[in-house]
């Protein structure tokens, strides 16, 4: 039987790179898409050093030219992993940064997916996976731009899964919890690119940090590869699984919440953003501590 070919976007760093390299180590046929040519060179050198065979291509998901070239590749499994994180209050973030968040995390992946989905339909075979986030299931203060983009992606993925089921094309989501790859901490540094008047901001972003302790990423890559290869056929894949308890508790809370609840009080996660050090590793019983924070 012919082996599947896997396209991983955003494979220059973090989860994408780990998944692409992990699949290559298994002997799978992998196309690693990266945003810039400099990343192509760096990743090729690293793959060569590790003795890994994979196709490395420039693929900026927001670039129509890159998308058109990508559609010439024969792909059986598409992992839409490319993404950025723009932190900041929704009343502070400049328009261009908010739009950029959605261009990279929502519009780019969906537009890339369109032609690949039609090719999969013709083959009567294929799988499309979206790298969402725990932030696509629960929205935190100061992460509204990023969380909003992931909530949108969740809706698009659910619709797509129902549209493609009759054509034997699978759709799945991966929802990582807080992992220490640098991605989350960069979210709370994104404000440094803002071209605005700091005096008009609601919050002092110099004082804020990502408000969760973060896990080592090794386990996520291992579990994500199971989703990509079909070893797991769950639609939603929260990693670690224990974080699903937190997300479900948050979703349930919204059905009972009143607009007057805790009015006039600083939210616990805003306070934690002020108190926590960046890149903080987890302590024993992290999930219970997070649940306690949510119920404060």
Image: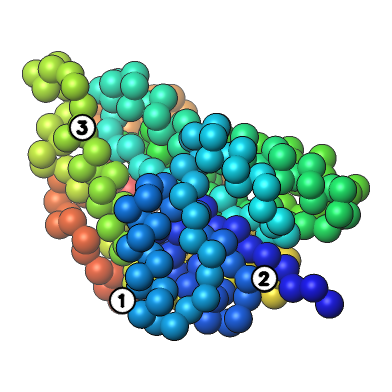
- Where is residue 108? Give x, y as percent: 54, 36
Q: In which quarter of the image is residue 214?
A: bottom left
Q: How crowded is mark 1: few (under 14 residues within 10 Å), some or many (20 or more)?
A: few
Residue 58 lies, with reference to residue 114, above or below; the image says below
Provide the residue designation for mark 1: 284
Q: Is residue 100 left or right of residue 32?
A: left
Identify which residue is drawn at 61% across, 38% down: 68
Identify which residue is drawn at 49% across, 61% down: 56
- Where is residue 229? Give x, y as percent: 67, 71
Colouring method of the image: rainbow
Spatial CA span between label 1 and label 2: 32 Å
Looking at the image, do the residues carrying marks 3 and 2 touch, with CB atoms under 8 Å apart? Answer: no
Viewer-nearest of discs 1 and 3: 3
Quarter holding the N terminus is bottom right
Which residue is at the front of the view, 284 or 27?
27
What label does residue 229 carry, if any? 2
Provide the residue designation for mark 3: 193
Q: Is residue 106 visible?
A: no
Which residue is at the front of the view, 200 or 28?
28
N-terminal of the pair, mark 1 or mark 3, is: 3
What label does residue 250 carry, if any? none
């Amino acid at each position: 039987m012919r082996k599947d070919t896997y396209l991983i976007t955003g494979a220059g760093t973090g989860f994408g790179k780990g998944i692409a390299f992990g699949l290559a180590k298994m002997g799978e046929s992998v196309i690693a898409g990266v945003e810039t040519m400099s990343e192509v060179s760096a990743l090729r050198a690293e793959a060569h050093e590790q003795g890994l065979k994979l196709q490395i291509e420039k693929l900026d998901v927001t670039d129509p030219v890159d998308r058109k070239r990508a559609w010439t590749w024969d792909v059986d499994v598409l992992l839409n992993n490319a993404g950025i994180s723009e932190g900041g209050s929704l009343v502070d973030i400049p328009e261009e940064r908010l739009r950029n968040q959605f261009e990279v995390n929502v519009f780019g992946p969906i537009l890339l997916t369109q032609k690949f989905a039609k090719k999969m339909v013709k083959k009567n075979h294929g799988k499309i996976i979206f790298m969402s986030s725990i932030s696509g299931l629960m929205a935190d203060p100061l992460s509204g731009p990023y969380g909003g983009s992931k909530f949108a992606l969740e809706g698009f993925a659910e619709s797509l899964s129902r549209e493609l089921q009759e054509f034997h094309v699978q759709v799945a989501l991966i929802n990582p919890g807080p992992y220490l790859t640098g991605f989350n901490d960069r979210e709370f540094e994104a404000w440094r690119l803002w071209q605005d008047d700091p005096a008009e901001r609601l919050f002092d972003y110099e004082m804020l940090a990502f408000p969760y302790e973060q896990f080592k990423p090794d386990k996520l890559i291992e579990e994500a590869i199971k989703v990509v290869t079909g070893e797991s056929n769950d639609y939603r894949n929260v990693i670690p699984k224990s974080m699903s308890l937190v997300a479900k508790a948050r979703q349930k809370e919204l059905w009972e919440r009143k607009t007057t609840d805790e009015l006039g009080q600083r939210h616990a996660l805003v306070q934690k953003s002020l108190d926590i050090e960046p890149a903080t590793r987890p302590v024993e019983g992290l999930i219970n501590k997070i649940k306690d924070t949510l119920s404060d």
